[in-house]
Image: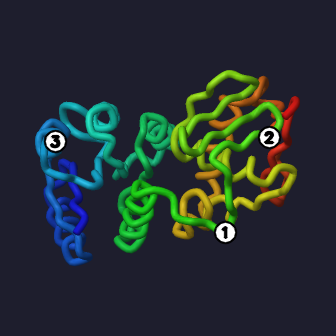
Amino acid sequence: MKKLLIVDDDQLLRRSLSFNLEQAGYLVKSAETAEAGLELLQGAGIDLVLLDIGLPGMDGLDAVRKIKQDYQIPVIFLTARRRELDEIVGLELGADDYVTKPFDLDVLLARIKAVLRRAAGPAAGPISQPSLLVSGDISVDTDAHTVHVAGVQIELAPREFDLLLSLVLQPNKVLAVDELLERVWGAEYIGQPQVVYVHIRWLREKIEANPNKPERILTVRGKGYKFIPRGEN
């Protein structure tokens, strides 16, 4: 049984969510503050943290930094803040996903399953891939989990890496947004194109000379995205 930790200052939400997650087959611990949650993580064998952003004392954004630094446990933000900036900042800091309150329990359960599945490692897919893939001046090493652009190593977050790999595996081919969602995030995310849009923007900022005029990851209006190899193999 997977063990989850809920960190939220809303007592009613903690009780209700703990009950529903236990009914779904999870072991659940909860904490009212980030500080208390971090204490519970010590030796508790937690598999995933559900973390509120707007906490008293240390907030969720600071807490996720600490969790990723010390434990490398997947984190899903629970947030009542609907501003996209908060969501994007949270993901850049290392959160694996976010759900805005009020949320549907079935949606949250699907997100939890998807994040736990990704944390366990990639499932075998229909496209075979070598450990080292070179396309133009980009090389992707799936064993070392590294990316080099024109010989320079680029630091990518896990989902950025998986997204780039999906594109590089099929150069010059247009991949639909829903196809990318299913490959990289899982079928639970189909119909949420903003997830792809945000990560494409982050990728372009890291691998393009001018992110506003991309030459490697191109948008095909109404269709999706395609990767164009640049430079020499």
Mark 1 crowd level (few <14, some 14–19, many ≥20, 10 Å Cα): few
In the rendered image of this protein, does residue 1 appear above or below residue 133?
below
Nearest to the observer: residue 193 or residue 139: 139
The answer to whether residue 144 is seen in the rendering is yes
Task: Report the side of 76 relative to 126 (left or right).
Answer: left
Q: Which mark is residue 33?
A: 3
Helix, strand or loop status at disc 1: loop
Image coordinates of residue 164 in percent, x first then y, are 67, 45
Q: How is the image coloured?
A: rainbow
Q: According to the image, label 1 marks what residue?
A: 126
Residue beneath the point at 71% across and 59% down: 177
Residue at 55 percent across and 40 percent down: it is: 145
Image x and y of residue 73, in percent:
31, 46
Answer with mark 2 or mark 1, whichever residue precedes in sequence: 1
Q: Which mark is residue 28?
A: none
Q: Callout 3: few (<14), some (14-19), or many (20+) C-alpha neighbours within 10 Å?
A: many
- Find the residue positioned furthest to the bottom: 23
Kind of residue sitting beneath label 3: Thr
Q: Is residue 99 above or below residue 83?
A: below
Q: Secondary structure at mark 2?
A: strand
Which residue is tagged 2? 135
Q: Give left or right: position of 38 versus 147.
A: left
| Callout 2 amino acid | Ser
Residue closer to the observer: 202 or 230: 230
Q: Nearer the viewer, residue 160 or 36?
A: 160
Circle nearer the N terminus (3, 2): 3
* Residue 34 position by quadrant: top left
